[in-house]
Image (cartoon, rainbow, N blue to C red):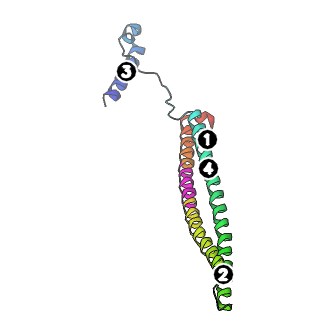
Amino acid sequence: MNLLRLVVFHAAIKVVATFSPSSKAATCFLPSLPTTSHLHLVSEADVIKSVEIAEKLWDEALAARKIANEVSARAEQLGQDAETSTNDVTASLKKGKSISVGKVEEAKRAQNLSLELGSLLDEAVEAQKKADEIETLAEEALKKSEAAFAQFLIDNPEEA
């Protein structure tokens, strides 16, 4: 409110001073007002940096997604191998009347494949979670870069 009064007062004095014969004397006592300046809150460098951050995060998200897909594909293949091995062991045990060392080894192999599959599935789930988290960060960074660019265009209409 005080600034508004000062501006109005300054304008009134200028109007009076322009019609007064001693206008130089009248204007020398006017308080100086700040000149019009543009405040640029977001610079071009800020926009470029925010875009680069978003691009980096999207690259990381893509890499994490590829890793997650590779682990999932390995888990799928291992699951098929474990299923085949288990079916072979089951069929072998149903055929024979006795348990041999070979049959025990086959059963052990099938069991190890199943355990390995469980570990690989855990790894695949973790890789998917990590990829999702990075993708969320990348999406947020993209929104921030878009907002920074929009503000830059507001701050710098000559750049639009």
Q: Which residues are magenta?
A: 128-140
Q: Local crowd at mark 4 within 10 Å, few (<14), some, or many (≥20)? A: some
Query: Within 10 angstroms of label 1, few (less than 14), some, or many (20 or more) residues?
Result: some
Quick one: label 4 or label 2, which is nearer the N terminus? 4
Q: Nearer the viewer, residue 123 or 25?
A: 123
List the residue tagged with mark 4.
60
What's under tag 4, amino acid-wise?
Glu
Where is mark 3, residue-wise? 10
Alpha carbon separation for disc pair 1 and 4: 12 Å
Q: Secondary structure at mark 2?
A: helix
Real-space Cα separation, disc 1 to disc 3, in angstroms: 47 Å
Figure quadrant of the N terminus: top left
Q: Which one is in front, 157 or 121?
A: 121
Q: Is residue 39 magenta?
A: no
* Above or below 24: residue 70: below
Residue density around tag 3, few if under 14, some if 14–19, many if 20 or more, within 10 Å: some
Q: Quadrant of residue 43?
A: top right
Q: CA distance from mark 4 to mark 2?
A: 46 Å
Tell me, yes or no, whether the highlighted magenta stretch contains residue 134. yes
